[in-house]
Image: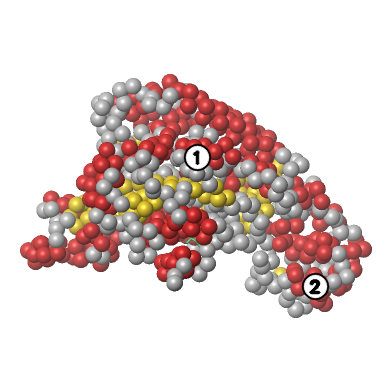
Amino acid sequence: METISDRIHGILKEYWGYRQFRPLQQEIIEHVLQGRDALALLPTGGGKSVCFQVPAMAMRGVCLVVSPLIALMKDQVENLVRRGIPAAAIYGGLSRQEMEWILNGAVHGRYKFLYVSPERCQNEMFLAHLRQMQVCLLAVDEAHCISQWGYDFRPPYLQIAGLRPILPGVPLLALTATATPDVVEDIQEKLQVHPRKVFRKSFGRENLVYYVIYDEDKMGRLERIVRKLKGSGIVYTRSRRRTVDVSMQLQQRGIPAACYHAGLPPAERSLRQDAWMAGKVQVMVATNAFGMGIDKPDVRFVVHLDLPDTLEAYFQEAGRAGRDGRRSFALLVYHDSDRLAARENFGKSYPSMDFIRRVYDALGNYCQVPAGCGEGAVFPFDLRHFCHEYVLPVPETASAVSFLERAGYFRLSDSVKESSRLRIIADYEVLYRYQVEHPGQEALLQALLRVHGGRLFSDYAGISEKEMARRCGQTEDQVRKQLALLHSHSIVDYRPLPAGVLLWWGQDRLKHFPSLPGEVYAARKAAARRKLDAVIGYATEKSLCRSRYLLQYFGEEGSPDCGSCDVCIERKHPVLSMEDRGRLLAKAEPLLQAPRDMKAFMEALPDEPELLLRQFWNELLAEERIVSSDGCSFSWNQQAGKTETTPEDRTGSGMFPGSERFPAGLADSATCN
Ligand code: ADP
């Protein structure tokens, strides 16, 4: 008899190729399979998707997944389809026809997963189809977006609650990577998780070493960090311009670096991301636009050169280091002036409600959309031009537009994944005849089918005109024209994507803006201010372990000191006496003629205190007296100088200020764990 456990392990193995579940995954899956609601809090990279994808595979019907980010939805859909699991996504920006096609497919059981953006949850066409679907599970990804206390509140998320009465008896699984206690409470209430059940995996990341480094010369400090830590890294800065400056300065100092922000053309962003993923570029200097969906295991350091807006954002971004479980660094380079800049920035990020209303009205006029119309309409959008036309200040307007976007009124195309879309609407026979009658179009049709396969007959696919042009030996312009012709002959449905940033109206223009009450906005602003205070608190904290500070913020009490952050090191770091060091050096040199890792080294010297040996090992590494060819075992560096250093020399690492001590964790970064 096959047990539930066998069944879900079978699915995990068959579709994902994994043998074992990660901590909590199996518990969550079994709970959902019993038809019960839950909220799952797993850190980034904890494997949240499997928690709803595996049980859905074991159930009959379609799994509805609400997800806030289109790029993320598209990624997941592509991932599933690659594994042979039928999936589709609907979001603002799809034409009515495309949406209807997908929804009909879902009603007829063509998909196992249907991703939907929260704005669509209130759409009438969607709701009408939903009533006819057999839904097995409602998964709400990034569930913290439903809470106005969360750092990423998106009002359209509130609409999800409206789905529950339409789907009686369908279990709900909410998932998030960051949630403070008030947000956990709020999510459960708003999504009607009943009875309440929270699965929470500790957010502690034992292999991450947190450091706050106080320094005004941020560039000089950054250079030393990169040289010292080696390996791949990400440097986060606040502004696009600064990403360009910092990456150029790193390049001038001989460090392979690139910059990344949402203002770059999508193709350029993909290229840079690929180069960094492949290790051709060591350091990516980026705004917070970089990171989502990036799953690079061997990121050795994440440096924040500016204060992040919230600790949630910091934790997520810093958490991109060390996904492979090896020692990695999360460093915040801080100076007192940052605090003032952050406060000033805060003012600009939260313009008054009156100002937002002004921007909303101006956008309506700019796009010439009358009240009561507009849903689904698309316009080219140039922020600077818009600000110039309506005499609006750029930073505040950008904040207002971004607020309106997050509230679901608009969507801006800035995703790397944005592309033209196409589906073949003629059937095989018609297509064949058409090719015979129009030999000039054959090459393009063949190229489309070769790249996207028969799937094009059943679903829209994102296509690249550039790629098609390359394959057919034509120019991009010729390809666009041919596709338009095929469209006019009803062979394909072609949805070209014009160049530049586009603005989609997520809903009809309101006569009376806002639909969001002013108090909600004020409460949100106050919550954001508290979040900023917590960030400043983190940066200026002198006595509480960094890891504990973060975990306490996320409601995890009682976690131990990490022992490796700057606060812990400063507190308990022993300095080796000259006598200890001399004795240990005499023992270590012959021992390490053959490679050993730290554990083997310590085992070979059982009479020496462990703490002393750790410290000594760290110093050997820092001084490059021992080297490794594989990152695991170390042997004596025959090239290293013989001169003895003094304890004073040894207390400053070069990377950290002279008064601060060398972090023990840095040395551990080279050991296998
Ligand atoms: P999250 O959404 O929590 O950040 P993902 O669902 O994207 O995490 O998973 C992160 C990575 O871990 C993905 O590459 C995923 O395939 C992988 N993963 C998930 N579950 C397992 C497992 N049980 N064994 C091995 N890898 C897993």
Residue 56 placement: quadrant: bottom left
Q: Nearer the viewer, residue 161 or 251?
A: 161
Q: Nearer the viewer, mark 2 or mark 1?
A: 1
| Sooner in the amino-acid sequence: mark 2 or mark 1 | 1
Give the residue at the far bottom of this rendering.
594
What kind of element bears circle 2? helix
Q: Where is residue 342? Give x, y as percent.
A: 59, 33
> Does the residue at mark 2 contact the one at mark 1 (Cβ under 8 Å)?
no
Could you give the CA–CA distance between mark 2 and mark 1, rounded to whole angstroms?
50 Å
Quarter-of-image position of residue 557: top right
What label sits on residue 187 in the rendered view? 1
Q: Amino acid at mark 1?
A: Ile
| Residue 503 placement, left or right of 438 | right
Q: Is residue 27 left or right of residue 401?
A: right
Mark 2 highlights which residue? 603
Secondary structure at numbered mark 1: helix
Task: Write the residue at 77% across / 68% down.
Answer: 625
Asked if disc 2 is less than 8 Å from ligand 1, the answer is no
Residue located 67% across and 36% down the image? 537
Q: Using residue 466 as the reference point, say whether residue 668 is left or right of it.
A: right
Relative height, residue 541 to residue 330 (above, below):
above
